[in-house]
Image: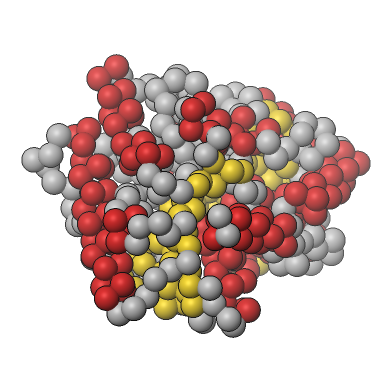
Amino acid sequence: MRFLFVHQNFPGQFLHVLRHLAAMDRHELIFITQENANFIAGVRKATYRGPGELNPATHRDAQEFDHAVVRAQSVAQVAANLKALGFRPDVIIGHHGWGEMLNLGDVWPGVPSLGYYEFYYNVSGFDVNFDPEFQTPPEGLARVRAKNAVNLLALDNPGRGITPTHFQRSTYPEWAQSRIDVLPEGVNLDVCCPAPDAAQTVFQQGQIVVPPGRTLVTYVARDLEPYRGFHVMMRALPSLLRARPDVQVALVGSDGVSYGARLPDGTWREHLMGEVGGLLDLDRVHFCGRMDYADYVRLLQRSDAHVYLTYPFVASWSLREALAIGCALVVSDTAPVQEFVSHGQTGLLTPFLDSTALSTRIQELLEDTALAARLRRGARAWAERHLRMEDHLRGYERLINAMVTG
């Protein structure tokens, strides 16, 4: 078969299915994307130029849409060039978030299309105004609604959609949900697996040294920001460190902002250190930045308690990986997390907004080794039932075959 994939940041959410298809050595795989250094053997990249900086002359609520239609035009031009060279895909698979797929039906009418729907923005009931500390003013709600312009145009185009969780599908209007299949994402369970002897050896990565007998609490996010509960985690640390002199804390993530608002000056790490840094033993709190994947897996394998927090928003891949590794989890009681974690069975739920409760939950887990062991077994068993990569790939195959055969 001939496959066309589309995502501005190759390979995006399609890493595993691309590797799977390439390993068969019988498909033609082309990926339209912006230029980057990522590489997968057997996949040819066709690059397009991105839209550049936001245009300040465009109304603020329409700036993202302005970018989206520029991307749509650029991708369609690349597609037209491929068509002129004789390429016609049997199926098009891509991400709807940046507008890249909007015009492909004009280039190849009738070609089946499978689009990834990540999140539909709502002005209430989900992430917006969830946290009373960071409220969106009434004049900002129009911008939230405008973010759905690409979503709505994509839903009006032919084709089917996929999304990885029931929570994410629930963010879309009821009339749209029947067009979106839930296709759970998988984890490499051989790489992300428990390491029972990890606590018996010295863990060392950079400046972090955790000898046997010391306790390690971990927290991971792409960026250290409120959407992923960084402010709640930081405010929980003073009481945790006072109560447990044996604890070291590793905070993984960069100083950027993936979701939500930036501060006028500085980073969220600097802001929170200004608030609670004087109450912390900084010899026991480690800001790791971003880590190589192998080191990140080793860190979670060594973790005695792993914290994952998020607004009612898209759950991170790190949550799936922590379950597969069999971490003893303390997680926020928000809807996307509750789809993965059951309280007392695969982790401990804690109120997102309550840093005191978070500290208490972590201490509870560290002090009850039988509970921690049970949660570890439960997390790994759940991952083996629900996060198998083979199931993820078979789900793709079923959808693709159904679309191609009509």
- On screen, residue 305 versus residue 173, left or right, reads right
Placement of 74 over or under 365, stated as above or below? below
Residue, far right: 370
Q: Nearer the viewer, residue 262 or 19?
A: 19
Above or below for 291 versus 136: below
Question: For residue 166, which quarter of the picture?
Answer: top right
Image position, residue 25 (x, y; %): 59, 82
Instruction: Please state the horizontal and vertical placement of residue 16, each as a whole percent of the image.
Output: 59, 65
Depth order, front residue of 378/67: 67
Q: Position of residue 227 (x, y in %)?
A: 47, 36
Is residue 143 or residue 70 the one in the foreground? 70
User: Residue at point 88% right, 43% down?
Assistant: 374
Kindly tell me whether residue 383 is visible in this rendering.
Answer: yes
Q: Quadrant of residue 297?
A: bottom right
Residue shown at 22%/33% (left/top)? 61
Q: Is residue 308 above or below residue 215?
A: above
Mark yes or no: residue 243 visible.
no
Q: Residue furthest top?
A: 138
Report the side of 192 relative to 63 (left or right).
right
Q: What's the residue at 41%, 31% (across, down)?
A: 121
State the quadrant of the C terminus. Answer: bottom right
Image position of 343 (left or right of 353):
right
At 54% from the left edge and 77% from the top edge, which residue is drawn?
Answer: 27
